[in-house]
Amino acid sequence: MPPKQEELLNILKKINYPGFSRDIVSFGIVKEIIINDSTILVSLLLPKENKKIEAEISEGVNNALKEVPGVSDVQVEIGIREQSQKSQDTASTSKKLPEIKYYIAVASGKGGVGKSTVAINLALAISKKRENVGLMDADIWGPSAPIMMGAVNERPVTTGNQKILPIDKLGLKLMSIGFLVDEEEAVIWRGPMVHGAIKQFIEDVEWEGTDYLVIDLPPGTGDAQLSLAQTVPLSGGVIVTTPQDVALIDVKRGILMFQKLNIPVIGIVENMSYLELPDIDTPIDIFGRGGGKKMAEKFNVPYLGEIPLDPDIRIGGDTGKPIIESKPDSKAAKAFVGIADKVLDFLE
């Protein structure tokens, strides 16, 4: 007796997209399963062409389904979503991407490492050296830019051509889901809603004139990361970690995510690296130290620098005055500036 489609779908849910923690079914990659007696045809649609990923997924599907009783042959057909879109009618009303020179993604393998703090201060540090800098808070489930940038009560407006004008704050063009929806509403978003929000933040926001767009991604590897990679040509990704081993384990996932999507890894930032006290000469390594640098060496990616554990960073975030603005001469602010220099060197 041939297997049921639901049974096969459940098996495919155990196959993760290479480099991601999400499975190929929840990512919407499995488009069709056809059962013809003992032969199974699986149709997949990938976000972009990548022969290595195609081979990995195809092998995974074959190996998994051939273990199913009653299945003698598995055939995998793979299409590319980009090609499918390009083949649509040229009269389509598809929207044009803004002419942004550099898209800079800031990511982390797990939450709680200060990714948003790094993204915001990095964007501000770049704005001290270059003009036309924007910050896109794409952390759908935990938008923190409105608070950390002192823009909680700001609300974007639309232009005559229905473009959303980003908030102008501290010299940055700023957009966040936190300006548009209540937090309780955003936390339940999944799949298609997340993809739609990411596309809207790129296509429907008036980013024209922006040369450097820093994008604060949600932690982990999931819908938002894949959606962004499908939507814009990312110039590179910055991975944020803390020194302890439990955080460094997830750095590998972040690096593999960028590599699988053919996105250059700009480098690793070690946040909360050490604590300095006025009455102690030697810095205190609360979470250990140097793990980020070791991971950079292990995966042969640049090490961008370390950020100290400074109470003023937290205070600046809570009060809407990031440390780059509130204490530009502090060691932490200078560390962010040094990281911005390396990011600009990489891009330019």
Image (spheres, rainbow, N blue to C red):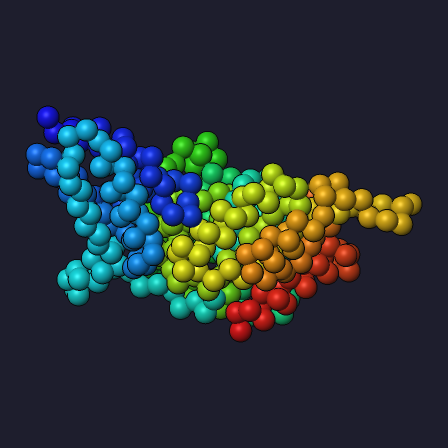
Q: Nearer the viewer, residue 261 or 207?
A: 261
* Quadrant (top left/top right/bottom left/bottom right) for the N terminus: top left
From the viewer's perspective, is 103 left or right of 58? Answer: right
Would residue 156 be seen by someone viewing this image from the given angle? no
Residue sitting at the far right: 279
| Image position, residue 165 (x, y; %) | 44, 57
| Image position, residue 2 (x, y; %) | 12, 29
10 up-or-down from 106: above or below: above
Residue sitting at the far bottom: 348
Residue at 28% from the left image edge and 46% from the top image edge: 59
93 up-or-down from 247: above or below: below
Q: Nearer the viewer, residue 145 or 164?
A: 145
From the viewer's perspective, is 334 left or right of 257? Answer: right
Residue at 17% from the left image edge and 62% from the top image edge: 87
263 up-or-down from 39: above or below: below
Looking at the rendered structure, the number of numbered marks drawn on it comes to 0
Q: Nearer the viewer, residue 316 or 9?
A: 9
Would residue 15 be seen by someone viewing this image from the given angle? yes
Residue sitting at the far top: 1
Residue at 60% from the left image edge and 38% from the top image edge: 246
From the viewer's perspective, is 284 left or right of 306? Answer: right
Residue at 55% from the left image edge and 56% from the top image edge: 299
| Image position, residue 68 (x, y; %) | 22, 31
182 up-or-down from 168: above or below: above
| Image position, residue 331 (x, y; %) | 77, 57
